Amino acid sequence: MLPALGMFGKIRVWSVVRGDEVVEVNVARVAFAGLAFLVMFVAVRNVPAVLEFTVLSHLPLDSGSRFAITTITRYVILMIGLIVGLTYLEIEWSQYGWLVAAATVGLGFGLQEIFANFISGLIVLLERPCRVGDVVTVDGVTGVVTRIQMRATTVTNFDQQELIVPNKEFVTGKLLNWTLSSSVNRVVITIGVAYGSDVEQVTQLLGDAARANPNVMKDPAPSVTFEKFGASSLEFTLRFHLPSLDLRLSTLHDVNTTIDRRCREAGIEIAFPQQDLHLRSIDRRIVEALGRGQATGEPAGLAPTAAEMPESPTDDSDSAAREG
């Protein structure tokens, strides 16, 4: 059996000339290269997961750091596997200069964006302007970074829609990361109350409504400012901080509900847009109708007065008969 297997080392597949030396690539070397590629494929699929389960999960690292380490590990395994496999096949890059030149031309035209996104993906993993689990706003869409791949990054918005963003956008474009260095975020609520309201009472009420919520941070403390005299309201702004973005919507609902209830209890009117209409000139009949309505306590109408009523035909016939 072993002598039979040894025959594979004598079967030449191709030859490679290195200066004055001729190197033969036999079936055994091809088999070893195939085995190296197979091991590389299995390792790329499984080693990062095993590494995270056995080592990284026990270290004080966030999910973004663990993802960056496993992704870089996958790239390293892929590179080592390719080098080992090509070495067994006696393939040298110098022999394929024409292919490299063609690839360079391709990168200059059609593959330029793909190559730029790949390099940008490496920069994102190493420099980490965003990490898996971060809440970001990119291209007007706010969501959670769920995957960082070789070409693009996946951002899932709060409607569970996935936005595929080329990695180059995170390196060369504008990126708003809500949780890069801290998950603390500020909430701003604008409230308009009716003119004549007690400013100090409104300020105290809004501050108490925020401080009464257990999710609102004590430091920095909530603040209330009287911003301006609006067209139909006195405008106040309430600002407070939350420790996490997950609490934003529920806390906003609770604080707004508390403000509405306390304003009604205190007799403070929440203002709404309104306009005053001044009549410069008005028809005489409308004035008389409004005057009659105010005198009798009945709804004012626009019915013509007795002086404006035409005489009926029966009145004309009766007067004619009397004259006859």
Image (tube, rainbow, N blue to C red):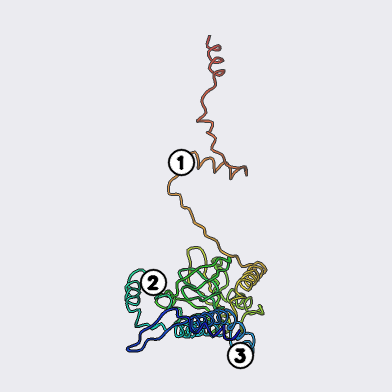
On the rendered structure, is 250 left or right of 138?
A: right
Determine whether 110 is above or below 9 in the image. Answer: above
From the image, tell me which residue sits under label 3. Answer: 60
CA gap between label 1 and label 3 equals 82 Å
Examine the rendering and report whether any part of residue 128 can be seen: no
Q: Nearer the viewer, residue 222 or 2?
A: 2
CA gap between label 3 and label 2 equals 36 Å
Seen as rendered, the residue at the extreme top is 324
Q: Position of residue 231 (x, y in %)?
A: 47, 63
* The image quarter in which residue 133 lies: bottom right
CA gap between label 2 and label 1 equals 73 Å
Circle 1 — which element?
Answer: loop
Q: Earlier in the sequence, mark 1 or mark 3?
A: 3
Q: Are marks 3 and 2 in contact (CB under 8 Å)?
A: no
From the image, tell me which residue sits under label 2. Answer: 113
Examine the rendering and report whether any part of residue 200 can be seen: yes
Q: Position of residue 262 (x, y in %)?
A: 66, 70
* Residue beneath the point at 41% across and 82% down: 91
Q: Residues within 10 Å of mark 2 (few under 14, many from 20)?
A: some
Q: Which mark is residue 283?
A: 1
Circle 2 — which element?
Answer: helix
Q: Position of residue 5 (x, y in %)?
A: 56, 83
* The image quarter in which residue 255 lies: bottom right
Q: Residues within 10 Å of mark 3 (few under 14, many from 20)?
A: few
Q: Which mark is residue 40?
A: none
Residue type at mark 1: give it: Asp
The nearer-to-camera label among 2 and 1 is 2
The nearer-to-camera label among 3 and 2 is 2
Where is the N terminus found, in terms of image quarters?
bottom right
* Residue beneath the point at 62% across and 42% down: 298
Residue type at mark 3: give it: Pro
Q: Nearer the viewer, residue 43 or 250?
A: 43
